[in-house]
Image: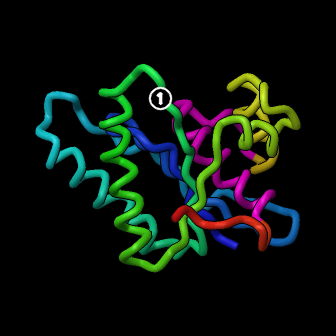
Amino acid sequence: MVVLGVDPGITNLGLGVVEQVGKRAQMLHAEVVQTRPDEPPPQRVGRLYQRVYQVAATYRPSAIAVEEQFFYRQNELAYKVGWAMGVVLLVADQMGIPVYGYGPPQVKQALVGTGRAEKAQVAYMVRVLLGLKTLPQPSHLADALAIALAHCFHHSGANKPLS
């Protein structure tokens, strides 16, 4: 199974492609797509779309796993993260790839064993599980790979794609 993990963001969008064969997982690709706040929104969204589409077309994932984020008092941030989520959903629709959402506690539980794990613990487990020599940096990269791994470890027939 090949999974594209996405840590959605308009300024920094993490992409991590993980392949699971049996109980073993390996990283196929990882990058952070960056845009600048001073760029017009159409250019920022366009750049994200181009990279997400290119990565999905190259690796042909069987699923896209995204971090579901909850914003209670940060309306502007939620709005702009929505642009990135729209890009991911559009690419998924165009390519016929199901999208699954995981909240931060689910990802932490899947990788560390507790939903209250620290980010450093999650990054460490990403390094160990993927056999990487160093911790993935920046955090958006580690988060994207963690989300992909969470899907690999917890996907079952009971999991439903976002609807």
> Measured along the vertical axis of the image, is residue 74 above or below residue 83?
above
* Figure quadrant of residue 36: top left
Quadrant including the N terminus: bottom right
Q: Residues within 10 Å of mark 1 (few under 14, many from 20)?
A: few
Q: Along the horizontal axis of the image, is 130 left or right of 68?
A: right
The percent position of residue 79, horizontal first and vertical second, equals: 31, 36
* Amino acid type, label 1: Phe
Specify the color scheme: rainbow
At a point 39% along the width and 60% down the height, the residue shown is 52
| Mark 1: secondary structure | loop
Q: How many marks?
A: 1
Q: Does residue 2 lie above or below 122 as drawn?
A: below
Residue 50, magenta (yes or no): no
Magenta segment's dominant SS is helix
Of the pair 158 and 155, the residue shown nearer to us: 158
Image vertical order of residue 107 relative to residue 5, above or below: above
Judge whether 126 appears above or below 56 on screen: above
- Work out which residue is located at the far left of the displayed protein and give it: 40
Residue at the bottom extreme of this rendering = 96
* Chain part drawn in magenta: 132-155
Residue in front for this viewpoint, 22 or 80: 80
Residue depicted at x 45% and y 69%? 56
Instruction: Inspect the magenta stretch and tell me whether residue 141 lies in it.
Output: yes
- Residue 109 location, quadrant: top right
Classify residue 132 as left or right of residue 163: right
Image location of residue 34, percent across then percent down: 33, 39
Residue 156 locus on image (x, y percent):
79, 68
Q: Determine which quarter of the picture holds residue 107.
A: top right
Rendered location of residue 49, percent (x, y)? 30, 58
Q: Which residue is mark 1?
A: 71
Q: Residue at x 27, y 38 (%)?
A: 35
Identify the residue at image location x=56%, y=72%.
61
